[in-house]
Each structure stands twice: as C-alpha cells, then as structure tokens.
Amino acid sequence: MTTVRRSHERGITTLALDAPERRNALSARLVGDLAEALTECGEDGDVRAVVLTHTGNTFSAGADLRDPPHPDSLVALLRQIVELPRPVVARVTGHVRAGGLGLLGACDIAVASDAATFAFTEVRIGVAPAVISLPLLPRLDPRAVARHYLTGERFGAAEAARIGLVTAAGEDADDVLEPVLDGLRRSSPEALAETKRLLTAKVLDTFDREAADLTALSARLFSSAQAREGMTAFLERRDASWVL
C-alpha cells in the first residue's frame, strides 16, 4: 500500500502524502514512494504540472525518527523535485516541521492556508537543518532564516510568505492555488520546462557544491549523543536534558 495518493485533472497531477497516522513523517518508505510517483510524473506527457499536498492536518512532521530515510535518499528526493521537468507546486493546509520544510523549498511555488504552521525544530532534538538547506538557503531571507533555524520557533503562514518559504498564503489555500494552476495550464509545456531550468540553476549549483558535505554533517549529527537524547526526549514527550 502506497503512502502517496495520486489523482489527475486537466493536466495537473496531485500527489498527496498519505500517512496521516504518522503525520506524513518522512520515512524511508514515504520518500521512496514519493520519488517513484515523481518519476512517473516526469515521464508522463499528460502531466503539465504537479501539486504536492497532504492528507490529515500535517503536511509533514519531518524525518520519521522510527524509520528515518538515509540522508542520501532525502538529498536525491529534493534534487528530483528541483530537476523535474514539470513545475511542482506545494499546497499546505496544515503543519510543516523540520524536514518537511525541505519539500517546500524544493518546490517551484508553494501556497498555504492561514491555518498552516511552520517550524525548524531540528535544534530542539540535537541536530541541524543540514540537507534541507540545499533548496532552502538560496531562497529564504537570511536574517529571518537565522532566527528560525536557531530558535525552532513556530510561525504562521504570513511569516512564511514574508521570508520566501511559501509564495502566497490566504484563508483558503485552494483560492490561492486556482490562478496558479490556471496559469500553468495556459503555458507551453516546453516553455515551462526551460523556464524552470532558468529558475533552478542556482539551487542546483548549491546541490553540486554542498550536498556531500551536508549529507555527512547530517549523518554525523544524527549519530551523536545529543541527538540520541533529543530524539528519546521527543518520543517520550519530555524536555531534553539541556533545556534550562
């Protein structure tokens, strides 16, 4: 049974992360299922664009601490979204945390409802937002991202739009999404692919330069004593030992 639900309407394929009982956490299985679905979209001539969304009240809670993907596979998934020869549009109506924010960074456009919330929670479990920085840092406001990376604070859709994490937000995400999809349906498939190539060139340069180092950093931090304490505390629903 797949963890990604697929539907198609008038050139737009919607991929919905569909593991709500695990808050759509990025497990090895979900990452694999999403990569497979994206490959199919890239090969399907009927797909003009992809909408990446979710079931349940959480877009993604980040890495699944019980079944985490290898950092290499997460890097590959993020790069696949960036390189896909179809625009990928994120639609968020719930919560996004940690690694789930990397998916937003990899998408070409992201829309959110006012009910959505966001947080870079890695520092609170003893790790860093390493791999997800590959698509995020080239696109986010530097001063704002420093605050959110370092504090792990929760913030809303208006702040996410202000710092460049999402393109636009509104009371109803589908109302925000409608003109975006209309524009994509009116655009030439070849022109979309070439325009996306222009827009993602600098992001892909970051992958080429930094992916290996950030993958190694992620693996090192996840195996550290502080990460073990942080993840244990999270699973046990208690404060980590360093909390003052």
Image (cartoon, helix red, strand yellow):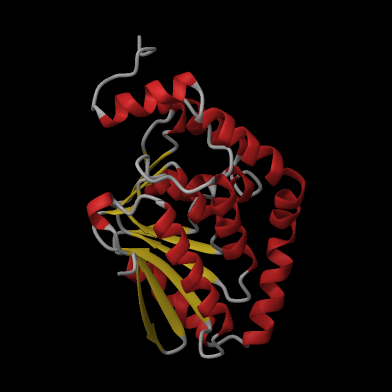
Where is 80 relative to 138, above or below?
below
- In the rendered image, which quarter contains the N terminus? bottom left
Is residue 202 or residue 186 the one in the foreground?
A: 202
Is residue 113 or residue 189 the one in the foreground?
A: 189
Residue 156, given in percent of the width and then of the height, sits at 36, 44
Is residue 108 or residue 234 the one in the foreground?
A: 234
Q: Is residue 217 left or right of residue 235?
A: right
**Does residue 120 appear in this view?**
yes
**Does residue 62 appear in this view?**
no
Is residue 221 or residue 149 the one in the foreground?
A: 221
Residue drawn at point x = 23 percent, y = 27 percent = 237
Residue drawn at point x = 68 percent, y = 83 percent = 191
- In the rendered image, which quarter contains the C terminus? top left
Specify the quadrant of the image occupied by residue 235.
Answer: top left
Residue 222, given in percent of the width and then of the height, sits at 50, 31
Where is 216 relative to 11, above or below?
above
